[in-house]
Amino acid sequence: MSERIDGVEVVECTRCPALCDARSQIVNGVGTTTPPILFVGEAPGATEDREGEPFVGRSGTVLNEALRNRGLARRDVRITNCVRCRPPENRDPHTDELANCREHLEREIDGVDPTVIVTLGRVPSEHLLERDVTVTNEAGDVIERRIGGEPRRIVICVHPAATLYDRSQEETFASAIDTAVSLVGGDVGGQARLGDF
Ligand code: URA
């Protein structure tokens, strides 16, 4: 197994043979390294695999707009995935793949120390909470859970793509994001504002 880590970035990793075969590149988290909010998705899709950045496809457009509506830019927060390599055919990541990538995710969470974690969809919600989650019912719930070394606050959220397929999820998505933003209070947006001058 070959592996190279640089801070919270995984430069080289061959833990999952099927994902190594299918990926174009490893997709690390992006955004500030001192995030008030860390968004955790499932795994890169085709666009993310090509561009090397999480949430840059259609789901990313929904997430970006939700951030923008609250005066935030991607660089004000951090965005990552449970699994850093694109699963073939966009299938869900397998249990062993989630487990293999868990150390990378925990290193990132410990390293960037977010005030709040928002889980985008069922897979990251179940992965971090280690139980079954019905995201449509539980979206907006705030749960404390020890992850890696520290107790963390997690806000369950529906996946942004859910709003594209089911308009009734738009309100659920928006109100979970509002909950996360209200939990971090005024501690967001400063870096974008400074950077804009
Ligand atoms: N969906 C995810 O869960 N992650 C991405 O990076 C893109 C889409």
Image: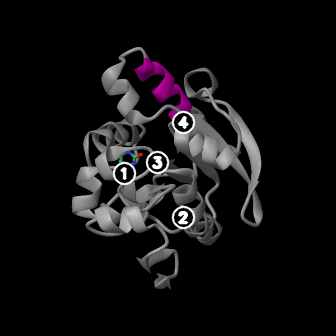
| Residue 183 found in image quarter | top right
Between 134 and 189, which is closer to the camera in this rendering? 134
Secondary element at tag 2: helix
Q: Earlier in the sequence, mark 1 or mark 3?
A: 3
As measured in the structure, the alpha-carbon distance from the residue carrying label 3 to the one carrying label 2 is 11 Å
Secondary element at tag 1: loop
Q: Residues within 10 Å of mark 1 (few under 14, many from 20)?
A: many
Comparing labels 2 and 1, the label whose residue is closer to the camera: 2
Q: Earlier in the sequence, mark 3 or mark 2?
A: 3
Q: Which span of residues is magenta-colored?
A: 169-178
Numbered label attached to residue 101: 2
**Which residue type does callout 4 highlight?**
Arg
Which residue has dot 1 on it?
73
Numbered label attached to residue 42: 3
**Which residue type does callout 3 highlight?**
Glu
Is the CB of the residue bearing disc 2 within 8 angstroms of ligand 1? Answer: no
As measured in the structure, the alpha-carbon distance from the residue carrying label 1 to the one carrying label 4 is 24 Å
Q: Residues within 10 Å of mark 2 (few under 14, many from 20)?
A: some
As measured in the structure, the alpha-carbon distance from the residue carrying label 2 to the one carrying label 1 is 27 Å
Is the CB of the residue bearing disc 3 within 8 angstroms of ligand 1? Answer: yes
Which residue has dot 4 on it?
122
**Which residue type does callout 2 highlight?**
Cys
Secondary element at tag 4: helix
Q: Is residue 156 magenta?
A: no
Q: Residue at x 32, y 60 (%)?
A: 53
Q: Position of residue 48 (x, y in %)?
A: 29, 55
Q: Position of residue 39 (x, y in %)?
A: 50, 49
Q: Position of residue 22 (x, y in %)?
A: 30, 62
Q: Earlier in the sequence, mark 3 or mark 4?
A: 3
